[in-house]
Image (cartoon, rainbow, N blue to C red):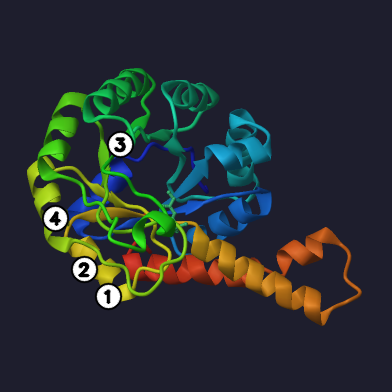
Amino acid sequence: MMVITMLVNMDKMLKKAQREHYAVAQFNINNLEWTRFILEECNSNSSPVILGVSEGAIKYMGGYKIVVDMVNDLIAYLNITIPVSIHLDHASSFESCKKAIDAGFTSVMIDASSETLDNNINITKQVVDYAKDHNVTVEGEIGHIGSNEDSNNNGILYANVEDCIKYVQATNIDFLAPALGSVHGPYHGKPILNFDRMIEIAHQTKLPLVLHGGSGIYDEQIRQAIDCGIVKLNINTELQMAWTKAVRIKLQDDKEVYDPRKIIKAGEEALKKVVRDKIQLLGSFHKQ
Ligand code: 13P
């Protein structure tokens, strides 16, 4: 008998990855079709998956509950058997995390990284207390992971090791996303990641680490990052670019098409290829 997946938090999923030295991808979702494509491709590769949902994407799709219901219904309809986490990405407040948890998200990231360390600790602690009562895992951020606009100059900020230790001890979070030189969105040139810092933070905090801004990081850098303690890699922009490129070609080549299902589907294979390639690179296939 086939056992259908229930949503899970990231605890077992990422501890197993940490033990066995691979990483799990967080693929960000924007709509029903993307969610379906990602679930299908991860399931075909027997890879666990984290569906990342930003506050903007939640607003776009119609709220926290619709996202959880959509994912649950797709899992049942598609007979998905891999572990799936649904994770709030870069929550801006405790209230947002609470709404996600109440709606059934299994994991949340609180991003109070632009606050002072003490404020970041206080906000994160509040989230952790609520989340633990609901069997929900929590990711926190130290240092600020911005976009290329902040980092294309001398502004790259790497997380401070002492801050990481203090933050982890004071908050009891499950996973840490320290700023390590990656940025959200496209890079200008090769990313400059601080691997020594990565090793030191992983060693000192003992926590599974998360690397944001996974799109555009070179394959060999990703492999090295996994060796240094990264167990979760977030990918959004690469999916968006691959899907859009394929859809743009479809629209240029086929001037008659008007059915939105055909237009959206034109990006399916390109999006699935990104998912497949990342799963291979991270080593998470056949790890369910
Ligand atoms: P990219 O859009 O650069 O892949 O970053 C995704 C991310 O880190 C989401 O939190």
**Quarter-wise, where is residue 192 in the image?**
bottom left
The amino acid type, in three-letter code, at marker 2 is Gln
Q: CA distance from mark 1 to mark 3?
A: 26 Å
Look at the numbered discs 3 and 2 and tell me whether their residues touch, using CB distance below 8 Å.
Answer: no
User: Where is mark 3, residue-wise?
Assistant: 140
Q: Which mark is residue 224?
A: 2
Q: Position of residue 197 (x, y in %)?
A: 14, 55
Task: Kindly state the secondary structure of the residue where label 1 is placed.
Answer: helix
Q: Earlier in the sequence, mark 4 or mark 3?
A: 3
Q: Is residue 251 left or right of residue 30?
A: right
Q: Secondary structure at mark 4?
A: helix
The amino acid marked with disc number 1 is Glu
Q: Earlier in the sequence, mark 3 or mark 2?
A: 3
Give residue 161's quadrant in the image.
Answer: top left
State the residue lying farthest toward the bottom. Answer: 253
Q: Which residue is mark 4?
A: 197
Residue that appears at 45% across and 51% down = 82
* Label 1 neighbour load within 10 Å: few <14, some 14-19, many 20+: few
Check contact, mark 1 vs mark 2: CB within 8 A: yes
Q: Residue 13 in the image: state x and y as whole percent.
A: 32, 46
Disc 1 versus disc 4: nearer the observer: 4
Q: Which residue is mark 1?
A: 220
